[in-house]
Image (cartoon, rainbow, N blue to C red):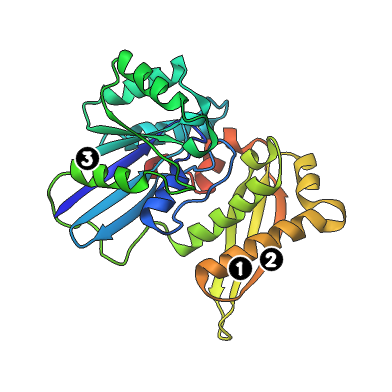
Amino acid sequence: MKSGYVAVIGKANAGKSTLINVLVGEKVAIVSPKPQTTRNAILGVLTREDYQLVFVDTPGIYKGKTYLADLMTKTAENAARDVDLILYVHDGHGGIHESDLELIKKYSALKIPMIMAYTKIDIMPRENIPLDVKKLYEEGVSCDVFPVSARKGINVKKLLNALVERVPEGEKMIDDDIVSDKSEKFMISEIMREKILLKYDKEIPHGIAIIINTFELQENGVYDINLDIVCEKANHKSILIGKQGKAIKEVSSFARQDMEKFLGKKVFLTTYVKVKEDWRDKPNLVKNYGYDPKNN
């Protein structure tokens, strides 16, 4: 039996969460085109008869300017130090720059076995792939590189086989029926945040926190979910709500549909928008909103 922890590391928006969802076969992490969609280290567990891979999805490495951004970067760095294998995810569509090489070398220097997933090959010129791989090797990057497209399923099986081959022999670490370490309540808050990331542009989604006030299954089989959407500015609140509440109604309906799909039951969703000025730079609020340094 092969068994091991795999830290999934890479720059923001490299496609880490999408790849993990495809590998695990279920949605364990939210996805959007915005940088640092993932804020916590999230476990995604793939269990088969002869192996178990525990993927540690980490926040994208991103040079932000807030306390929360710094905390997320530390979360990614810490996750890479206590695993059996590093899966470094690189956005092939974005090319390879000096900052990419610097990060790749930083993680390869940890002396932990590493494999690279070179992603998004379905939206880039194929002739760029061998040129980038050659550049990596010329720069001293010696890990195996797998060009993949998670969306199209290209080379995902080859990557998976390589991951299984590289983890050590061992027993299962997590029960067969578990695919994530996160609770239903956590996933509900993440679904709400995902829909906001997808609907609103620019900076507003990055200043959002979701607080679940009520998460209860009623006798009639309907989940009663009451939550707060916390933003940083009064004008952000106005944009989130929209004219006559149209925007918040739309995004709440969008989120409710996904919540019902995830829970397998009807959902009665109530949302409120509140303002906490610059909460991402206030350690006590960052902790209160679920981003505790001790848990990351």
**Are discs 2 and 1 less than 8 Å apart at CB?**
yes
Q: Position of residue 136 (x, y in %)?
A: 35, 19
Which residue is pictured at 42% across the width and 52% down the height?
22
Above or below: residue 90 compared with residue 229: above
Task: Determine which residue is flagged by label 1.
Answer: 225
Asked if residue 274 lies left or right of residue 139, the reply is right
Pinpoint residue 215: horizontal percent, then vertical percent.
55, 68
Q: Is the residue 73 above or below the residue 163 in the image?
A: above
Residue at the spot x=67%, y=60% of the render?
A: 254
Residue 211 relative to residue 115: left or right: right
The image's mark for residue 84 is: 3
**Image coordinates for residue 251, horizontal then vertical, percent:** 70, 56
Please determine whether, in this image, residue 229 is positioned above or below residue 233.
below
Q: Nearer the viewer, residue 74 or 16?
A: 16
Q: Which residue of the protein is positioned furthest toward the front in this rendering?
A: 127
Element under disc 2: strand
Nearest-to-viewer mark from 3 and 1: 3
Circle 2 is placed at which residue position?
A: 270
Kind of element beneath mark 3: loop
Residue found at the far right of this picture: 244
Which of pointers 3 and 2 lies earlier in the amino acid sequence? Answer: 3
Label 2 to label 1, Cα distance in Å? 6 Å
Kind of residue indicated by mark 2? Thr
Q: Badge 3, how many Cα within 10 Å: few under 14, some, many 20+?
A: some
* Quadrant where the C terminus is found in the figure: top left
Q: Is residue 139 visible?
A: no
Give how far across and how far down residue 52 sits, in percent: 23, 55
Residue 228 vertical position relative to residue 55 in the rendered view, above or below? below
